[in-house]
Amino acid sequence: MQCTVSWTGDNTASGSRSAMSFVAETGSGHMLVMDGAPDADKPANGGANLAPRPLETVLAGAGGCTAYDVVLILKRGRHDVRGCSVRLSSERAPVDPKVFTSIHMHFVVTGRGLSASAVERAIAMSHDKYCSATIMLGKTAAITTSFELHEA
C-alpha cells in the first residue's frame, strides 16, 4: 500500500485561505484533501477549516475499516444485512504526541431477521482479528463498542 501526501504550499499571500492544506494521492489513485485547524494567533501556522484534519481521517478510516468487516462478516454468514453505520467518538492525550486514548464505536445495523448475537459476533471478530486500523489504534486507545439493531 502506498500514498503520497503533498503540502499545497503557503498560498495565503496569493489569496488562498489556508497555509496548512495537504493533498494525499492514494496507491489506488484517489485524492484526499486535508487541512489544519485555524490558528487565530499565528495564521501562517494554521489551516482554514476547508477539509478534515489528518487525525479525523485516521478516525474515519478506522470506522470504514470496521464497518466494512462487519458487513462482510454478516454477508458471509448469509445474514440479510441492509445497512451499517458507525459513529465514532474519541479522546486524545492532552500533550504531544496527542495520540488517541479512547475511542467508542456505536454501530447501527439494519437488516431482516438479524440476531443481536450475530451482530455482536461480527463486531468482535472485526476488532479482535480483522480490522487493522482498530487493532493498531488499540495500542494506545481503549476501544469500546456498542450497537443497535434495526429491522428493515
Image: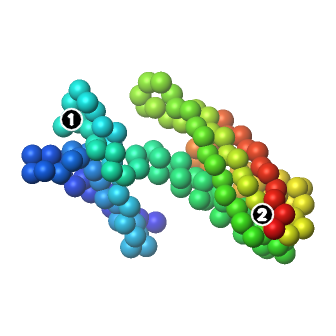
- The circle drawn on residue 110 is 2
Q: Residue at x 60, y 40 (%)?
A: 89
In the rendered image of this protein, does residue 90 appear above or below residue 150? above
In the rendered image of this protein, does residue 124 appear above or below residue 30? above
Q: Observer-nearest residue: 83 or 61?
A: 83
Q: How is the image coloured?
A: rainbow
Task: Check disc 1 and report the residue beneath it.
Answer: 43
The amino acid marked with disc number 1 is: Pro
Which of pointers 2 and 1 lies earlier in the amino acid sequence? Answer: 1
Please indicate whether residue 141 sits to the left or right of residue 13 in the image. right
Q: Residue at x 79, y 51 (%)?
A: 148
Considering the numbered disc 2 on the image, is that residue within a helix, a strand or a loop?
A: strand
Q: Position of residue 83 (x, y in %)?
A: 72, 66
Considering the numbered disc 1 on the image, is that residue within a helix, a strand or a loop?
A: helix
Q: Quadrant of residue 141?
A: top right
In the rendered image of this protein, does residue 67 appear above or below residue 92? below
